[in-house]
Image: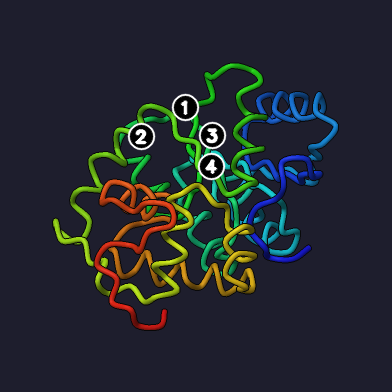
Amino acid sequence: MTDEPGAPADASLSVVIVENHPLYRKGLRSQFETDSAITVIAEFDNAAEAVREVLRLRPSVVLMDLHLPWTSGMRATYCGAQAITEIRQDWPAANIAVITMFDDEERVREALKAGARSYVSKDGEPDEVIHVVRLTAQGIAVLNREASEVVKKILPHARNGFTSFSELGTRENEQLTLAAAGATDRQIAAKLSLAPKTVANYWTNIRTKLGVPSREAAVELARANGFQPGEPAPGSSGDPG
């Protein structure tokens, strides 16, 4: 399996579940078994093992709880965000969806800053998790109401109120404009004739220059600042990305 982000909606999707409650983990697996296009390839009940094995398995989507022990046998603490950070450091294209009971602003911020693509509640409808996994695998963010509210709070204050689009190079602007128009990373790579790893590297540059925690935050910030399909991104420097 490659580190290419996203997958077509009709492709077979591989999922890794990271959840320390065995009954809930079993329930998630049962839900996925109702969809022939989704295969659970592994389950983990602690963060440390999940990080190691996710980097080896490279699934389409990692479904991650936040309240996890770091290693088996330890008391559960909020290790999920740290696990997400470590996965994304070595695999920037990882599609990670948080599924949790915790919707407070602190937890949402931690997860998004770590690089979670989607953030949903455990108390949603039974088929919601399948919908979330399908969209997350395509590079589309799914945020519950609480997470969306946090994003709205943090986006206007990126870089202490200064949005530095002018620092983006030409390729970075093109990539961000396509993403703001709804393109997945796979589609961006094809459109711009880029390798998937190059797209992932550009996202790292874009996030750093805009001072935002994730791809999704960069896209929302771009939309809020007038990025339109087929038009030059505002503030483009014209320099190579």
Residue pushed farthest front? Answer: 230
Q: Position of residue 76 (x, y in %)?
A: 51, 40
The residue identified by callout 2 is 148
Mark 3: which amino acid? Ile
Colouring rule applied to residues: rainbow
Amino acid type, label 4: Leu
Q: Residue at x 36, y 56 (%)?
A: 213
Rendered position, 176 above or below 7: below
What residue is pinned by disc 4?
68
- Which of discs 3 and 4 lies nearer the camera? The answer is 3
Gap in Å between the C-alphas at discs 2 and 4? 23 Å
Q: Quadrant of residue 65?
A: top right
x and y, in percent, of residue 60 in the image: 70, 50
Dot 4, crowdedness within 10 Å: few (<14), some or many (≥20)? many
Q: In the rendering, which numbered label is found on residue 31? A: none
Residue 157 placement, left or right of 149: left
Disc 1 + disc 2, Cβ < 8 Å: no
Q: For the view shown, which residue lies furthest in the left direction?
A: 161
- Residue 69 seen: yes
Q: Check disc 3 and report the residue beneath it.
A: 99
Q: Which mark, by number, is residue 101?
A: 1
- Left-right relation of 56 to 179: right
Give the number of the mark in front: 2 or 4: 2
The residue lying toward the viewer, choosing from 17 and 152, is: 152
Residue drawn 48% across and 37% down? 119
